[in-house]
Amino acid sequence: MNKQLSKNTVRCGLIQASNVKGPESSNQAIRQAAIDKHLKYIKQAADKKVKILCLQELFYGPYFAAEENPRWYQLAERVPDGPTVSLMRQIARRYKMVIVAPVYEEVMSGEYYNTAAVIDADGKFLGKYRKNHLPHCHPGFWEKFYFRPGNLGYPVFQTQYATIGVYLCYDRHYPEGMRIMALKGAQIVFNPNATVSGLSEHIWKLEMPAHVAFNQIYAGVINRVGKEKPWLTGEFYGTSYFADPRGQIIAQAGRNKDEVLVADLDLDYIKEVRNNWQFYRDRRPETYGEIIK
């Protein structure tokens, strides 16, 4: 996006990071170490004047769906009243920063979701997105053991700086939710992931740029970093990025390092792109009924 930014520009950030402690440690130690690490990166983002910050999928621990083990149910917490989201609300208020915090949500014993809490810059809890599409088909991705499919649809959240939506990891393989969020007014969709090297790498830089090009919005796409013992299901390869409404990757993080990625997103550019290519004018929703049969 080689253009002068308008006054309607919001600075956004993504944190990609390796996990600190593995399953040899207690769940409490795992959570605390990960949160302590992320607090340092959140401070870095604040120092860079980030206004909307997104953390990675299940950010306060390892990607435990690499195995089926009931011990990880203990990492689940209530949203918004659990300890992690309560802390993130304080941090958001301190830095006047919108925070998207993906956590393991407990509704009641035995009912759990892969959830992202959305917190406004004044610390207000705006709502949550629950991951709709759950993988349970590849070695090391046993999510249906831990989560129910999301039941909140595809909400958007009007923050102080922009209207945003959330997709979680495997959701990115499905275009329908992106279109719904765009139709509801989302300007930026954040997509936290835990994806490993192999088959996914070919489409990592294709899917979300294509989604935002079709819907003429922005995306912030995150992947965690490193290999997580003892599972070693693959390398979480980072390379988080921002894509603009034409589907161009405008900022990208490195492959093998913890990083705070920052980009300035000009929200007026959305209208400029839509005025050039009238995808919304030319939609034919009355012809799409077969897709839900």
Image (tube, rainbow, N blue to C red):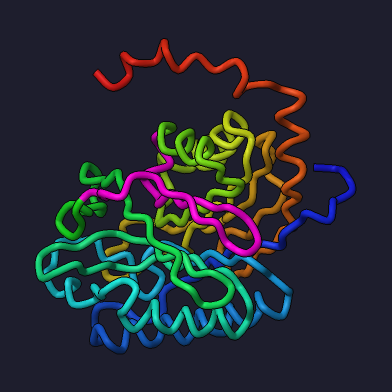
| Quarter of the rendering containing residue 52 | bottom right
Horizontal side of 6 relative to 210 (left or right) equals right
The answer to whether residue 231 is visible is yes
Residue 138 location (% of width, % of height):
25, 44
Question: Farthest residue toward the right?
Answer: 4
Q: How many marks?
A: 0
**In the image, residue 58 above or below residue 292:** below
Q: Which residues are magenta?
A: 149-174
**x then y, percent, for residue 15:** 56, 67
Check the picture and name the quadrant holding the N terminus: top right
Residue at the image point whose x is 41% and y is 65% from the top: 117
Residue displayed at 65% across by 36% down = 247
Measuring from the top left, give residue 113's x and y in whole percent: 25, 60
Q: Nearer the viewer, residue 292 or 65?
A: 292
Up the image or down, 281 lies above or below 160; here it is above
Q: Quadrant of residue 162?
A: bottom right
Q: Residue at x 54, y 34 (%)?
A: 211
Residue 258 visible in image: no
For residue 151, side relative to residue 124 (left or right): left
Residue 158, percent from left and from top: 55, 56
**Which of the pair 80/15 is nearer the observer?**
80
Magenta highlight on residue 130 = no
Query: Which of these two is toward me, 195 or 59?
Result: 59
Residue furthest top as drawn: 287
Residue 150 covered by magenta stretch: yes
Residue at horizontal 49%, vertical 69%? Answer: 119
Query: Where the C terminus falls, by quadrant?
Result: top left
